[in-house]
Amino acid sequence: MGRVRGESDVAYAAKIDRLIELVLSEQDIEKSDPASPSELARRVHLDTIGRIPTQKELSDFRDAFSAGQYDEILDDILNSPGAVSHAFNFWSDILRVKNGLGRGSAPAEAAYRFWLRDALKENLPYDEFVSQLVTATGQVWNNGAAGYYIRDQGMPLDNAANTARIFLGLRLECAQCHDHPFAEWTQVDFYKMAAFTYGMEAKRYDSPHRVSLRKRLRKSHEETIGIPGFPLLVSQAAADDWLKISNAGLALDRWGLSQSDYQQVAQRSIEHYREYTESKSALTLAVIQMFAPIKHIQSIDTGSTLKLPHDYQYDDASPFDPISPETIIGNVAVGDGVRPSADVYAEWLTAAENPRFKKIIVNRLWNRVFGRGIFEPIDDYTEYTHVSNPALLLALEDLFVEIGYDMRRFQKILFLTEAYRSRVFDGELAPGEPFYFQAPLLRRKSAEQMWDSLVYLAVGDVDEFFPRDAAALSDLAEAERIFDVFESYTEAEFFSVVDEMDEILQTSLPKEAVARRNIQEAQDRGDEAAIGQLTKKYRDMTRAKEEALRKVAYQADEKNAMKAGQPSPSMTMGSTAKQSVFRPPLPDAFPAPDGYDSDQRAAWDESQRRQLMVFAHLTRFMARASELESPARPGHFLNVFGQSDRRAIENASKQASVPQALMMKNGPVVKAVTSPYSHLARTIDFSATPEEIATLTFESILSRTPTDNELPIMMTLFTRDTRRSWRNLVHTLLNSRQFLFIQ
């Protein structure tokens, strides 16, 4: 909730309208006419909930609007689960939230998604929202915001550039490698800003004992070679490179080795490494599998110092010079060496005195509501940026602080303005041409808005359907339990576990090799029966080995897990929990008409069973876009319609394409909508008149009734086959400009 109340939302909206009207008057531009209640209802729901309104939502909105309760109905809509879903898509595009966070880490993705969803649901003030991201440390089950750094694991400079771009509108990427060619920022400037968060690392989790395990190789190497400190060499190239280091001669003298002697010892070192790694290869893989579920599960502040790169070329500093954190705009903030530098940065970044912080977010939210920013691009603010209405932008910045950085309330105030409640502007704007907001711009629906609207028509309201949550929570709980196991081991206990795993492998691997040879011999003989039996035996053998390894690896947690009534980690090692049925509940089959005899009923029931099976297949992965894997896979509706690939910030596309047209013509989603078992079809009384059927279909898809001119045209679609005529009507409306755009 917002921390400050201030004036009424209606009063704030009126101030915004006055500032818009002043500029419209100066530019001699007329205001747009008011939108109809139906137009406004559809637009508000698409802009807030991200889908077309349900029949009840449409009716409630019209009633509230006619009763002068537009303010109140906006509160209901903005506080709904659907609004959280749509806002989640918005911020996921900005923060590039994607499957496994691009690191194959299901627990980290789950925690980050839960954190983001909860922050939006609770309406976390924007300054706190950003501060929690920038300062996020700890394991993901304790702090899901750590996903912000895990997403850019191993790329701290890219993360710093993204932070400056998203929250400050500073495009510093070019200055990462050289002085910016078109702006004042130098490479040192970039490094000063990046130094604040350079120590925030999301490296692979390794328990201290796993690190100690690697020392076994070094110890075995020294025992074999017999020369303390002799390098562990993995190849002849490595041996040759070692001789090129500056102190190689001193080391050879200390060991009493000539270069010829060195080469002989080097060969023994290389051979030892080969034999050791071959003998321990299976164990190495087993240990990797042990740690796989918690590979990327934390962000830590290492306090590392950032240094200039080796190829730094300017006269103001030298390669490898250490760089201290220092801001390059606004009030100067520096790392004080006492507090974590990320905390200092977050405090400076979100301060009310930082004009860029407010400016960028209010313009971003304005763009979300009106379809265009007061300045463009919305994340690149420079001295050359043209602001179409400077007084409006400044007033919005002050408003945002006054209402306590409340993103939900800020957007509500924008929805209350006369400018937003006007008919959309559908004219053409030339590149760079300013827009003065006499109305919102006509916009094409995003991929998510298209999908979510069609999903509603197919299966009904799924705003509170979260099919991935059970698996995500399981992944997260499993990771936490495994982490606790590894943290609880002493070094001796960990080594004992590894040795037990080695014994299991030494026993099982030779047997598996024999089993594989037996299968190959059976294949050579063409003995199909033997192949089946031997393959089953081999699978049982490997399954038993995996279960034994799991039990040994996580044995410290067996009793605790059993007491808690949870599956122990040994039951889930190396695998993620399977999803339950990824489909909303199916409707009941339609009963046979009265008067049918037993044969007719049997035929009817079989026909309905088949239709219901087809509908089940079409809708098996239907949920809100926010609840699906992201980005969607190639060929999925969301992918075809331009969903962001989450590689770059806000990388979605709204460009039309031929594959989109084909998908809207006869794709599986449209087939689900026109199925007799779809939510839309089940709201239609097919015994009604064609006019009544057409009217209800219009309201369901376009949120309005057909006009006097449209209705006679629609009637020409209807023949004696009412259902087929209705399907033709649905296809027509789904492919209409009014459905594809936000008007």
Image: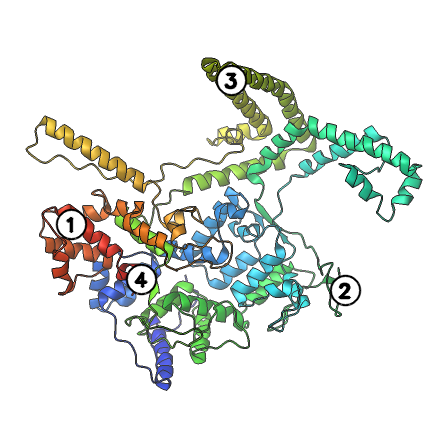
Residue highlighted by disc 2:
318
Picture disc at residue 125? none
Judged by depth in the image, the label closer to the viewer, 4 or 2, is 4
Tags 4 and 3 touching, CB below 8 Å: no
Residue 397 in the image: x percent, y percent?
46, 73
- For discs 2 and 3, the disc positioned in front in the rendered view: 3
**Residue farthest to the left?**
595
Nearest to viewer (mark 4 / mark 3): 3
Q: How much space separates mark 4 and mark 3, taking CA atoms? A: 60 Å
| Marks 4 and 1, how far apart at CA | 25 Å
Is residue 32 left or right of 273 when viewed as pictured?
left
* Disc 3: which residue: 523
Q: Tag on residue 741?
A: 4
Give amino acid for label 2: Ser
Query: Which quarter shows the N terminus?
Result: bottom left
Q: Are marks 2 and 3 in contact (CB under 8 Å)?
A: no
Identify whether 319 is placed above or below 672.
below
